[in-house]
Amino acid sequence: MIVKGSLEKAKHYIESHSENLEQKKKRQGPCITMSRETGTGADKIGEALIEFFQPYWNKNYPPWTLFDKNLIEKVLEDHHLPQALSQYFVEDKLSELKSTVNEMLGLHPNTWVLVSKTSNTILQLAQIGNCIIIGRAGNIITANLKNSFHIRLVSPIEKKIRYVMSEYNINKTEANEFIKKEDLARKNYLKKYFNKDVDDPLLYNLVINTESISFKNTAEIIGRIVLHNLPQLFSYSEEDAQVQQY
């Protein structure tokens, strides 16, 4: 079955494991979290990583799925929250003053509540496995799960600027400002809500400088290391269909 669209894929992922908890635990797959500097192509690397894992996927297990922007939709759906709240789930984009005023006026819940709900959803997805979670402190939230593996993507500023210019059709100055703003927001998000430094290499199993590595090759590097480090999660019982083993 071919599912198009990131949100549709996410919903298909959720529907595919509508079974009891013990079955879910038995069929748990890997969870890969991906922290990234802006402009390192995390989404594209995530999609390439899903392609890499296809030969190792068994149809009796959840399909490999990428959660980034569609994660917001999942959180809203899980906790029966209005779509209008989606703007408050973006990593620390709302100013402290505006957030406080809106909470006082009852325009949206306390941001700590929203972060907590997001964290709960991330933890649930990670416990199922076969997912790639980009951003939102996924590595911190899933740090104690044995099926999790954590990636950090970095790259020199010039390459990131070129990527952002191409991706968003903006000039060099705008791209540079965009990168600074986004990276600062993510850094503040992790510090404010989890008291962690996003640049601490000890928060990750693998840090990759993508300066001279293509998205496809980066995905292959990550995929092969995950296969090597979590081999038990790529082994299936005899009753399952045969899959290629690493």
Image: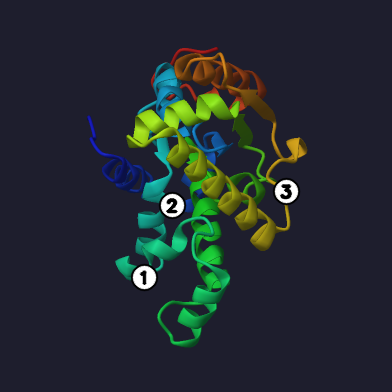
Q: Is residue 128 visible?
A: no
* Helix, strand or loop under label 1: loop
Q: Position of residue 44 (x, y in %)?
A: 41, 28
Q: Return the residue nearer the eye: 152 or 9.
A: 152
- Vertical side of 172 occupied by 70: above or below: below
Q: CA distance from mark 2 to mark 3?
A: 37 Å
The residue identified by callout 3 is 197
Which of labels 2 and 3 is toward the front? 3
Q: Quadrant of the N terminus?
A: top left
Which of labels 1 and 3 is toward the front? 3
Q: Amino acid at mark 3?
A: Asp
Dot 2: within a 10 Å radius of its alpha carbon, few (fewer than 14), some, or many (20 or more) residues? Answer: few
The number of discs equals 3
Q: Return the residue nearer the eye: 184 or 175.
A: 175
Which image quadrant for residue 82? Answer: bottom left
Identify the mark nearer the N-term, 2 or 1.
2
Please name the residue shown 54% across and 26% down the image. 158
Label drawn at residue 20: 2
* Helix, strand or loop under label 2: loop
The colour mode here is: rainbow
Please name the residue shown 73% across and 58% down the image. 195
The residue identified by callout 1 is 81
Dot 3: within a 10 Å radius of its alpha carbon, few (fewer than 14), some, or many (20 or more) residues? Answer: some
Horizontal side, residue 112 vs residue 54: left or right: right
Q: Position of residue 223 (x, y in %)?
A: 54, 20
Q: Amino acid at mark 1?
A: Leu
